[in-house]
């Protein structure tokens, strides 16, 4: 008896990309690039990948779209990997800038803006509020709770 199957899925978060306003939940957050691989399995062990897709999605509501192979995907993947390295503290700001300079973009002001935004995102929020429905901490920039989805336009301040 041979047991085989398909649709076993592995998901890997590659990293944050750029700030974007979500058309679904209306939050302005850094979107996340994720890789999803579907596998053919033999005896419940993943053997052969048969589908690989990259998905760019909102971190709050997971709304997003699949990206097609090409230069745009490679650029976003490069950005996500390096942003994640910077946020994890595995590379310095100088190393981050050097990687983009090696790419030959020459857009140093754009890189500095991305670095400033990434640094700003890693700071602790100044005004902390809580969702009135579930009690999850939220900042004043967020329109909907990431935990329960309720509008947090009128949060209770602490």
Image (spheres, helix red, strand yellow):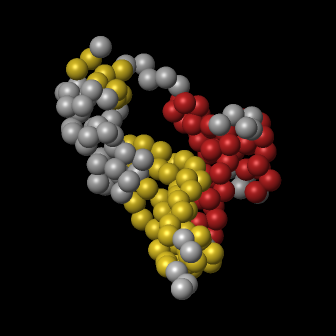
Q: Is residue 115 visible?
A: yes
Above-or-below relation of 154 to 71? above
Q: Is residue 17 visible?
A: no
Residue drawn at the location 26% of the way across and 40% of the way down: 148
38 and 119: which is toward the camera: 38
Residue drawn at the location 62% of the way across and 59% of the way down: 77
Q: Return the residue found at the far bottom.
A: 1
Indicate the quadrant containing the N terminus: top left, top right, bottom left or bottom right.
bottom right
Q: Quadrant of residue 152?
A: top left
Answer left or right for 27 relative to 19: left
Residue drawn at the location 54% of the way across and 47% of the way down: 16
70 and 157: which is toward the camera: 157
Answer left or right for 127 relative to 37: left
Q: Quadrant of residue 39?
A: bottom right
Residue drawn at the location 79% of the way across and 45% of the way down: 98
Q: Position of residue 47 (x, y in %)?
A: 63, 75
Q: Number of labelled discs?
A: 0
Above-or-below relation of 114 to 134? below
35 and 21: which is toward the camera: 35
Q: Position of residue 80 (x, y in %)?
A: 60, 52
Q: Position of residue 117 (x, y in %)?
A: 54, 36
Answer left or right for 88 relative to 21: right
Indicate the quadrant containing the C terminus: top left, top right, bottom left or bottom right.
top left
Q: Quadrant of residue 126?
A: top left
Answer left or right for 117 relative to 155: right
Q: Position of residue 102 (x, y in %)?
A: 80, 53
Above-or-below relation of 4 to 148? below
Q: Return the residue found at the far front.
A: 1
Above-or-below relation of 136 to 151? above
């Amino acid at each position: 008896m041979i047991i085989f199957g398909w649709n076993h899925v592995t998901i890997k978060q590659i990293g944050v990309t750029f700030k974007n306003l979500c058309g679904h939940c209306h939050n302005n957050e850094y979107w996340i690039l994720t890789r999803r691989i579907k596998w053919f399995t033999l005896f419940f062990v993943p053997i052969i990948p048969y589908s690989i897709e990259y998905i760019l999605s909102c971190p709050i509501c997971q709304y997003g779209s699949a990206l097609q192979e090409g230069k745009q995907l490679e650029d976003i993947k490069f950005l996500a990997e390096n942003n994640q390295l910077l946020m994890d503290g595995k590379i310095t700001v100088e190393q981050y800038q050097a990687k983009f300079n090696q790419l030959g973009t020459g857009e140093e002001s754009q890189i500095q803006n991305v670095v400033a935004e990434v640094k700003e995102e890693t700071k602790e929020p100044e005004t902390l509020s809580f969702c009135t429905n579930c009690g999850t901490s939220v900042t004043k920039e967020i329109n909907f709770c990431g935990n329960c989805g309720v509008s947090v336009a009128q949060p209770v301040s602490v």
